[in-house]
Image (spheres, helix red, strand yellow):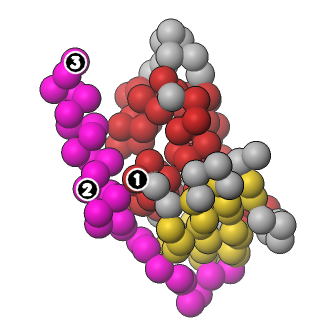
Amino acid sequence: MSDLRELYQEVILDHTKRPRNFGPLEEATGRANGANPLCGDVIAVYLEVVGDTVKNIRFAGAGCAISTASASLMTETLKGKTIEEAQVIFDCFHDTVTSSPDTEVDLAGLGKLAVLAGVREFPMRVKCASLAWHTMRAALDGENDTVTTE
């Protein structure tokens, strides 16, 4: 188990140091801002939706390692997915990170996102991991208010 935990930490550090899909998106058809006041994370999520598909997704902002890695992994996962698939992935991810550490979860269904399942052991970090996801949903829904984890 410690080898798996080390691998997860390496993936999180890699996405923190070299976030994928970072920066604004000129062709954005949707955008939302998010903030986690307790940790100081701030994020903007940009979506380019064509038909019912997330053609492109990017993020910008500043945050802790968990917040940045989660946003980076989210963009990699959701690019090319339908809006319905994005919703299913959001629900699966959210259910996993907000579940009790004692609850059995199917990590196979999360793919690369499984590296973030460990945050459920640290309730204060769940907000860091889920900020980008709630902000993405707000961008899909066309909400203009800043998403907050409070």
Measured Cα–Cα span from mark 3 to mark 1: 22 Å
Of the two numbered discs 1 and 2 in the rendering, the one whose residue sits closer to the viewer? 1
Q: Is residue 6 magenta?
A: yes
Residue 52 at x, y percent in the picture:
66, 64
Asked whether 87 or 32 is in front, the reply is 32
| Residue visible at 67% across and 60% down in the picture | 35
Badge 1 is on which residue? 65
Residue 84 visible in the displayed image: no
* Label pair 1/2, CB-CB below 8 angstroms: no
Above or below, 36 against 5 in this view is: below
Measured Cα–Cα span from mark 1 to mark 2: 10 Å
Q: Earlier in the sequence, mark 1 or mark 2?
A: 2
Residue 11 at x, y percent in the picture:
27, 47
Of the two numbered discs 3 and 1 in the rendering, the one whose residue sits closer to the viewer? 1
Query: Based on the displayed image, in which of its 4 quarters is residue 141 positioned?
Result: bottom right
Badge 3 is on which residue? 1
The magenta-colored residue range is 1-29
Q: Is residue 97 left or right of residue 70?
A: right
Residue type for callout 3? Met
Residue type for callout 1? Ala
Asked whether 96 or 13 is in front, the reply is 13
Query: Based on the displayed image, in which of its 4 quarters is residue 91 positioned?
Result: top right
Residue at the farthest bottom position: 26
Report the label total: 3
Q: Earlier in the sequence, mark 2 or mark 3?
A: 3
